Image (cartoon, grey):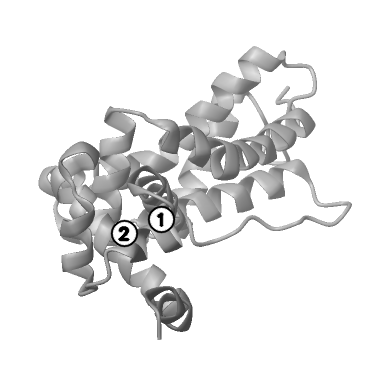
Amino acid sequence: MTETEQLKVDGEATRQRILEAAEEIFAEKGREAASVRDILKRAGIRNIAAVNYHFGDKDSLYIATVKNAHQSCCAQNFPDWPEGVSPRQKLREYIDIMVARMLEPPRPSAMQVMMREMAQPTEACAEVVREYIRPMARILENILVELLPNVPEPKRMLIGNSIVAQCLFYRQNRPVIEQLFGADVFEKLTADVLAEHILSFTEKALGLSMTGEAAK
């Protein structure tokens, strides 16, 4: 059996092993310092052609690794709401999902890869934004258009960023919160508690009633 035939037989299992190993190596060493040989050694794969077969080259493997790391941190999908669901309910469910994602313990290597990419963005960041983050942003934008029809688009963008930032805070700053208030306190901050707080805080900041209408 040729090397190519063996790679076909191994298929997705080999591809996944490479991705997992690449995530660890890129997290430890960064994109430039990591080598294909390091990655294959970590994956326990001797065939040097495996990366080219499954990904094309090291740069393509890096992009696939960043995308895979992002997906692992964003497992839950947003619902396709039927007609008649209020914008407030949509916003609550949107925040529910965002908070649940943030509280789900991520793989340390996935977070490290994503943080490295955010610190020094490459074409991988552009692909993640295009394929995952932009569609998510459009969902929130559409909710805010329904909720705040008279607010101009630049202002809605800032409001959307503030909502997402409140959700992200509890992942990015978890170690600090635990140090300040204690891990036992953080454990009581369930997804439901945080989602209700963020929704209530946002509504009050926007001058909305609990029905999503402008407060009088």
Q: Quadrant of residue 107?
A: bottom left
User: Which residue type carries mark 1?
Assistant: Cys
Q: Give SS at disc 1.
A: loop
Residue at horizontal 55 percent and vertical 20 percent from the top: 158
Q: Give residue 38's position: percent from left, percent from top.
A: 16, 58
Residue sitting nearer the eye, 195 or 170: 170
Q: Give residue 44's position: percent from left, percent from top.
A: 20, 75
User: Which residue type carries mark 2?
Assistant: Pro
Residue sitting nearer the eye, 194 or 171: 171
Q: Give SS at disc 2.
A: loop
**Number of residues whose C-alpha sits closer than 10 Å to that of mark 1, classed few (under 14), some (14–19) or many (20 or more):** some
Residue at horizontal 33 percent and vertical 47 percent from the top: 58
Res. 84 in view? yes
Asked if disc 1 and disc 2 are in contact, CB closer than 8 Å, the reply is yes
Q: Is residue 107 left or right of residue 199?
A: left
Which mark sits nearer the N-terminus, 1 or 2?
1
Q: Residue at label 1?
A: 73
Q: Is residue 123 above or below residue 43?
A: above
Most distant residue in the bottom direction: 1
Quadrant location, the C terminus: top right
**Number of residues whose C-alpha sits closer than 10 Å to that of mark 2, classed few (under 14), some (14–19) or many (20 or more):** some
| Residue 160, label in figure | none
Residue sitting nearer the eye, 75 or 49: 49
Quadrant location, the N terminus: bottom left
Q: In this view, does 197 lie to the left or right of 95?
A: left
Residue at horizontal 45 percent and vertical 51 percent from the top: 99
Label 1 – label 2 distance at C-alpha: 6 Å
Q: Residue at label 2?
A: 106
Residue sitting nearer the eye, 126 or 114: 126
Q: In this view, does 39 lie to the left or right of 11?
A: left
Q: In this view, does 20 lie above or below 92?
A: below
